[in-house]
Amino acid sequence: MDRLTYYIDHGDGHYEPLLAYRAHDAGIDEMYARQLCTYLIAGGVQYELISNEMNDGEEILLVRPTGSNEPYYDEVNYRGRGIHVEFRKPNERGRLLAAMPYRTHYEVIRLLLKDIVQVSEHGSMLTTSTEVDEDRGCYVIYVRRINEA
C-alpha cells in the first residue's frame, strides 16, 4: 500500500479527489485505521464511507457528503498533540464520555475493529459508528450501552 485517497462520489459516475496520503508520510497503520472509519469529517463537511477499494498500490475510499458537520460544544482540536480517540454517545447529543491519548495508530486499529469496547469509567459499550475527524485531528467512536435500544 503506497497511498490512500479519498474520493467524493457525486453519484453520477463522477469522482472528485478529496484527500490523499502517502505511506511514507502517514504510515501504514494510520492508513489502515482510516479505512476502518465509517465517517470522515473534513473541511466542515461530514462524509459517509460508501466503498473501500484497492487499485494496485492505492487504497481508495469512496465517500458521500451527508451535510455540514455540526460541532459539539466541547470539541477539542488535537492537531499536533498526538493520537487521540474520543468516545461519544450519539443519542445524547454526542455527549463526550472519555478522550484518550494513544501512542500508536496500531492501538487505535484494535479499538476500531471491535463491536464492544471498554470506555474509561463507563465499562463495556457497543460501538455504533466510527469517525476520523480530519479537522480536529482525532478519531471518534460512537457508543451506547450494550442493553440500550
Image (cartoon, rainbow, N blue to C red):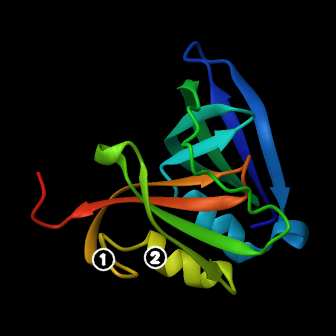
Q: Is residue 18 above or below residue 56?
A: above
Q: Is residue 124 above or below residue 43?
A: below
Can you see residue 36? no
Identified at 20% across, 65% down, the residue is 145
Identified at 79% across, 43% down, the residue is 19
Q: Is residue 4 above or below residue 112?
A: above
Q: Which mark is residue 113?
A: none
Q: Residue 130 in the image: x percent, y percent?
A: 46, 56
Query: Element at badge 1?
Result: loop
Q: What residue is shown with label 1?
A: 122
Identified at 64% across, 71% down, the residue is 84
Query: Element at badge 2?
Result: helix
Q: Residue 14 in the image: x percent, y percent?
A: 67, 18
The amino acid type of the residue labelled 2 equals Leu
Q: Residue 29 in the image: x percent, y percent?
A: 68, 76
Q: Is residue 109 above or below residue 144?
A: below
CA separation, marks 1 and 2? 15 Å
Q: Is residue 99 left or right of residue 15?
A: left
Q: Nearer the viewer, residue 73 or 32?
A: 73
Q: Is residue 72 left or right of residue 41?
A: left
In the picture, residue 76 is in which quadrant?
bottom right
Callout 1 environment at 10 Å: few (<14), some (14 to 19), or many (20+)? Answer: few
Q: Is residue 32 left or right of residue 128?
A: right
Can you see residue 12? yes
Q: What residue is shown with label 2?
A: 111
